[in-house]
Amino acid sequence: MGKEPSPEPLLPLTGPILNEMLLKHGMSGSIPPVDQSKLLDNDIDPVFQRSNWVLGVDENNVTCDIDGPLFKVDAASEAEMDILWKMLIPSFRLATKLIRHENLQEFWVKSVEAYKEQIPKQYAALSPKDVACEYLDLLASRTTFMFGIGNEPNIVASTWNSNTGLRISVMRTMGAMGAMKAEFMKSYGETQRELPAYPVIGLNLKHARLLLLAHQKKLARDQRLKLNFHIAIALCHELAHAFHNLCRLSGDKERRVFGNDSVTEEAGYSWEIFALGGVISQYRYSESASLYIGPMSVLKQPMDRRHIFFVPLEWILRLFLNSTWDNFEESKQNGFLNFRPLSSDKEHPVLELEGWNSAGGTKKHYILKEHGEVVEEYEETIRPRRTS
Ligand SMILES: [Zn+2]
């Protein structure tokens, strides 16, 4: 048997008109300059404090396929974690706004109310809103963050048990995580799911590599913006899981996920839909240097992978501005705080890509629409999936 051909990574984007349209609508390319003084400068939620970040299991030789080792020491160190943590600060600031803003508390409050009978006695006299606040504070003292948990073939979202990908996973466990090995954590995650909530949130190790590239000033501004945004949403998504786990302390199998129409029973997606009006991902992520070159895309529902909407870079940038948050109601009305104007059925979405498998599953067919008008149709041959 000959050697298997190594699968080519997907191009970040395909379809000549698609590329043109993404540039035209500011969904890829450069971003307008911003005065530093206008960027978010809020205190970060204590959950993100440096002492909650520990060295994980896979940080040896933090490296990048293209550039080789980024740190010139073999083993990961606290000094390296310091650098990664500092690079995360813009994401922490945005995530803090998204989690703690007065006008975005409904998700937490409704989650508390859904598990009312499980509220511990010491909080019984408090209003659901105050209990939600107590739970968020509890997360700050109980949550551990780390990079890299086990086998991580992909950077996009999926859950801990999936073998197709892992953005971040939440597991409930007790004790310090630093010395734990991936295999142990896997089995621990399987068997101890119903313990009281001491969440461990693991960011895919690829995030660390990208943060290090940013640290070395090897990412363009728009790439860095998308990375900061993507990580902020990922952190909130996983904290929504952690919060949900805290609410169902008894280990109740039944899930009562806020706003969920039982499509996924997925607390993280529910939070994304609550806060932003859709589920965000990086379009056409690949292993190669194309990281964060492509646009961010939105799914209205996590299960609807057929319809993709693209997000203008300026829309993302605006989330990182103080003015957007200082004028919350106005920003919400203007569509600065949710994806609805980008994906609305009534006003045609700015740019929608519809894609489905055809020709016996060997080809993928695409239709690109600008404000509801078809501007391009094309096909791609489906390439074999990279396995690892
Ligand atoms: Zn999730």
Image (cartoon, rainbow, N blue to C red):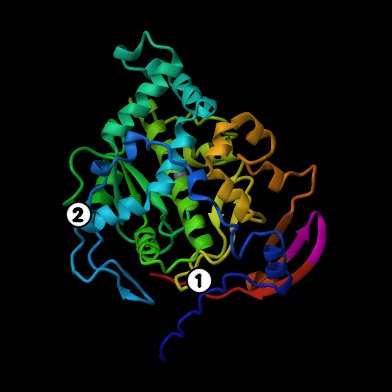
Give the class, few, some or many, for how many residues have Cα within 10 Å of label 1's Cα (few <14, many ≥20). some
Can see residue 206?
yes
* Among numbered discs 2 and 1, the one appearing first in the sequence: 2
Counting from the top left corner in percent of width and height, residue 209 is at 36, 64
Quadrant into which the N terminus falls: bottom left
Q: Is 368 colored magenta in this rendering?
A: yes
| Residue 351 image label | none
Question: Can residue 167 be found in the magenta stretch?
Answer: no
Q: Is residue 248 visible?
A: no
Q: Main secondary structure of the magenta part?
A: strand
Q: Which residue is mark 2?
A: 78
- What is the C-alpha distance between the residues marked 2 and 1? 29 Å
Q: Which residue is mark 1?
A: 290
SS type, badge 2: helix
Residue name at image x 72 percent, y 56 percent:
352
As helix, strand or loop, the secondary structure at mark 1 comes to: loop
**Location of residue 217 in the rendering, given as x and y in whole percent from the top left corner:** 40, 66
**In this picture, residue 11 sits left or right of residue 346:** left
Q: Amino acid at mark 2?
A: Glu
Residue 12 sits in which quadrant? bottom right
Q: Residue at x 26, y 53 (%)?
A: 82
* 385 or 244: nearer the viewer: 244
Q: Is residue 46 left or right of residue 38?
A: left
Give amino acid for label 1: Ser
As displayed, is residue 320 above or below residue 358?
above
Left of 341 or right of it: where is 289?
left
Magenta region, residue range: 367-375
